[in-house]
Image: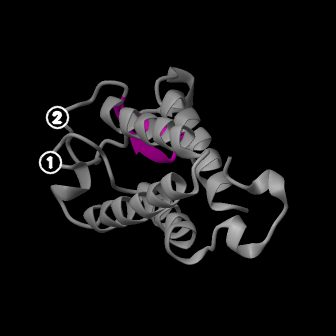
Amino acid sequence: MSIRRFALIWGIVFLLVGLAGFVPGFLMPFAPDHPPLAVESAGGLLFGLFPVNVLHNLVHIAFGIWGIAVWRSVAGSRTYAQSVAVIYAIFVVMGFFPGLNTTFGLIPLFGHDIWLHAVLAAGGAYFGFVARPAEARGTVAHDRTP
């Protein structure tokens, strides 16, 4: 997969997940012992696993729009991937600390979000820091930046 395709796919997935967080049928109630949140709007466990609220959903939508907006540029896609790697790695670390695991009560980052954010950070790290652009690999013309 090319760096550009990574940005497009990650962008689409982030956008869809962000929108899914606003669909009540995809949310299960938080467990009674979940860390307290100041923002409970659109809150719950997305697909019964991932804690979200309105702000969490908006972060996903923003990352989705960003990925879709930059996918036509190798440089933009690489910057996007690097940013996903760094930001989501920070989210992973935050998920382990009380207070930080809810971003001071604003955005839930606990539970299954920790491992999911680790996977997102790892994908971003590969495409942002390791993978070479398609042009450097000598792949076909349709994979090149216009």
Specify whether residue 146 is painted magenta.
no
Q: Which quadrant holds the N terminus? A: bottom right
In this view, 33 is above or below 140 = above
CB under 8 Å between discs 1 and 2 = yes
Q: Residue at x 31, y 42 (%)?
A: 32
* Magenta-highlighted residues: 43-53
Q: Name the quadrant containing residue 56.
A: top left
Q: Residue furthest front?
A: 146
Q: Amino acid at mark 1?
A: Phe
- Disc 1 on helix, strand or loop? loop
Q: Label 2 belongs to which residue? A: 38
Vertical placement of residue 61 versus 41, above or below: below
- Per the rendering, the mark at residue 104 is 1
For residue 61, what is the image quadrant? top left
Q: Amino acid at mark 2?
A: Ala
Q: In percent of the image, x 56 and y 30: which residue is there? A: 26
